[in-house]
Image (tube, helix red, strand yellow):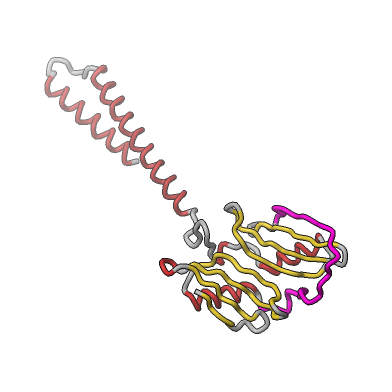
Amino acid sequence: MENRYKLASVLMSASLVMAACGGADENPDSADVDEVVEENEEFSSTEESAEESTEESTEESSGQSSGSTGDTIAPEDINHDAEEAVDAASENFDGELVEVELDDEDNQWIYKVDMESESEEYEVKLSVDDLSVVEEQTESDDDFDTDEHFSYGDAVPAEEAVQTAMDETNGELEGWTLDRDDGQLQYEVDMKNGDNGDSDVTINAENGEIVETDD
């Protein structure tokens, strides 16, 4: 709309100038008017292109995640929780849970779920975005160690353990692992603490309390 006002103003000014200079010739030279129109159309087109480019750049910037970087992930950028990942793995394999992990592999954040039965062991990697299978494999295994087994329901939710580690270190999440260590079900949460390096926070998975923090 603004460009139309500019064009009308220029045309009016051109007409007045031509009328003043050509008293004997009441009609302005059409070639001069056409030239003024073409110049203003080019100006309008350039201005509109610049505005569109600015809008596209703004939209692209607003679509980027503000909480995650290349080697860390913000909890709000994880579309599915760990329990959903375990349930999805259990639908594909009938066995006991051995380990659950959140990790970044080849620039893709995944849940890795390890399970085993009396004759096989199973590993599946699921995208945190939609729980689609990134990779899975099943192998023969006769080492059925019940001391390693656990139910995810026996642990506090991974999301709660992550928040505990973030509050403790004021860092960013690099990943976590849930398994049994010497019979104790625990989370190992990897945190990035800026210039201070990394921290590993061990959390008792049964009660959610911090066992130790290793800087």
Residue 28 picture quarter: top left
Residue 132 picture quarter: bottom right
Image mark count: 0
Residue 122 percent location from the top left of the image: 79, 61
Which region shows up in magenta?
132-156
> Of 140 and 152, which appears nearest the observer?
140
Residue located farthest toward the top when viewing the structure as drawn: 24
- Residue drawn at x 29%, y 30% is 40
Residue 196 percent location from the top left of the image: 42, 69
Q: Is residue 15 magenta?
A: no
Q: Is residue 135 magenta?
A: yes
> Of 155 and 55, which appears nearest the observer?
155
- Residue drawn at x 56%, y 81% is 212
- Residue drawn at x 79%, y 65% is 90
Q: Quadrant of the N terminus?
A: top left
Residue 70 percent location from the top left of the image: 51, 56
Residue 44 picture quarter: top left
Q: Is residue 25 above or below residue 171?
A: above
- Residue drawn at x 66%, y 66% is 101
Residue 159 percent location from the top left of the image: 61, 72
Horizontal side, residue 2 vs residue 13: left or right: right
Horizontal side, residue 3 vs residue 93: left or right: left
> Of 2 and 84, which appears nearest the observer?
84
Horizontal side, residue 27 vs residue 117: left or right: left
